[in-house]
Amino acid sequence: MKIVDLRSDTVSNPTPEMRQAMAQAPVGDDVYGEDPTVNRLQEIAAEMLGKESALFVPSGTMGNLAAIMAHCNRGDEVILGNFSHTFLYEAGGYSILGSVHPHLIPNQSDGTLDLDDIKNAIRPDDVHQPITRLICLENTHNRCGGVSLSAEYTKAVGELARKHKLKLHMDGARIFNAAVAQGISAQELAAPADSVTFCLSKGLCAPVGSVLCGSQEFISRAHRIRKQLGGGMRQAGIIAAAGIIALESMVNRLAEDHARAKRLATGLEGVRGLVLDPGIPYTNMVYLTITANNGLSDAQYIAQRLAEQGVLVGSVGKSRFRLVTHCWIDDEGVDRAIESFRKVLVVE
Ligand SMILES: *Cc1c(COP(=O)(O)O)cnc(C)c1O
């Protein structure tokens, strides 16, 4: 039985073209700065994000952590959304390893942080209080349904940051999904940010890696931090080669994942007992809730029943699911997922 794995776009395997590029990649010791493939990936990434410089890192988590540590001193404060990936799912690394204090403000349902909330979170110069240093945004916003932030909104936050002499970091794990969905360049979306992280290993299908982009001076600080965190890799061109393919030939096809998320959402809307989050899908994610239906309301139990039919979905909390489309999900897979939900949920 072919498995339809909708748990995340991180489960996407490298494409045959990537495997070939990986096998043939010229490599060197990247800790010495001598891996031509890593250097090329970093140059392409910096150009696509419109920044001076870029750094290849093993994961998005390390990219965000190195960014926060490069922007902040020990004891500084970072303003971040209560539903942000960095706050929820990165094991508190910025606190533990960076000694940086989080100032949480609520994420709005559209993934944004309210500008007044940001303003109110900025600390006055007072010895009782930590020093505000950084604002973090997330685009697309994972927990807010994969919704993308607009360039106008990001620009407004950038202006606010500059006015208060703060830095702006964007967790752009899926910034190319945001760019494709809005029909603008990732460069435009990232322009107001001092730094941006994006993932090669999600919808873009590379097996490993993320890239952190910013000014030359910022990246040279982040480079030392990457070394401190144990992220200096040697012949990393083997994996960077897949990253180059990801950037050169996997970006535009993200539109197909968005179209399939729409097909999935439309199909699931018709299944009794399921309610989609409003507005879904924005990009490649479908979030839905099960209403009490025939006594079946436990997401984990339903996920297990779906798995028996070869359909894997993510359960979020007690009664919610997240389904994510990616390169290895075709129309047939989408239809099988809809059919399996129907079988599991609809009892005569
Ligand atoms: C996946 C993800 C990350 C980074 O995750 P890694 O698994 O460490 O690569 C960061 N932010 C968001 C929004 C993500 O979805």
Image (tube, helix red, strand yellow):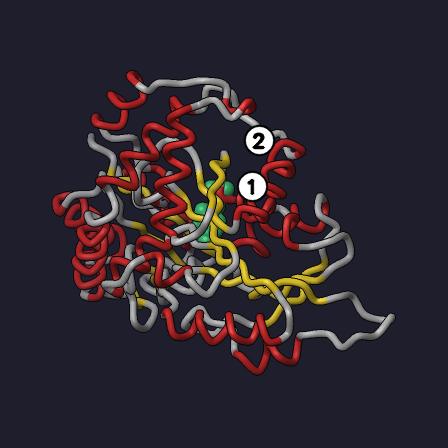
Q: How many labels, in total?
A: 2
Give the x, y percent position of residue 258.
22, 56
Q: Position of residue 46 (x, y in %)?
A: 41, 46
The reply, left or right, for residue 169 in relation to residue 103 is: left
Q: Is mark 2 within 8 Å of ligand 1?
A: no
- On the image, the x and y values in percent for residue 87 come to 59, 56
Q: Nearer the viewer, residue 53 or 151?
A: 53
Q: Which residue is the extreme one toward the left? A: 332
Above or below: residue 35 compared with residue 260 = above
Q: CA distance from mark 1 to mark 2?
A: 8 Å
Residues 81 and 193: in front is: 193
Residue holding disc 2: 231
Q: Earlier in the sequence, mark 1 or mark 2?
A: 1
Drawn side of residue 127 relative to residue 251, left or right:
right
Residue at 63% x, 67% y: name it.
166
| Residue 321 seen in this snapshot | yes
At mark 1, the secondary structure is: helix
Residue 263 image-quadrant placement:
bottom left
Residue in view at x 32 percent, y 30 percent: 242
Q: Nearer the viewer, residue 67 or 348?
A: 67
Question: Residue shown at 35%/37% (left/top)?
Answer: 11
- Residue at position x 27%, y 34% in the image: 245
User: Where is the C terminus found, in terms of image quarters?
Assistant: bottom left
Quarter holding the N terminus is: top left
Q: Is mark 1 within 8 Å of ligand 1?
A: yes
- Say above or below: 29 vs 14: above
Disc 2 residue type?
Gly
Q: Is residue 336 left or right of residue 286?
A: left
Amino acid type assigned to the residue bearing label 1 in the image: Met
Residue that carries the numbered disc 1 in the rendered image: 62
User: Does the CB distance between marks 1 and 2 fall below 8 Å?
Assistant: yes
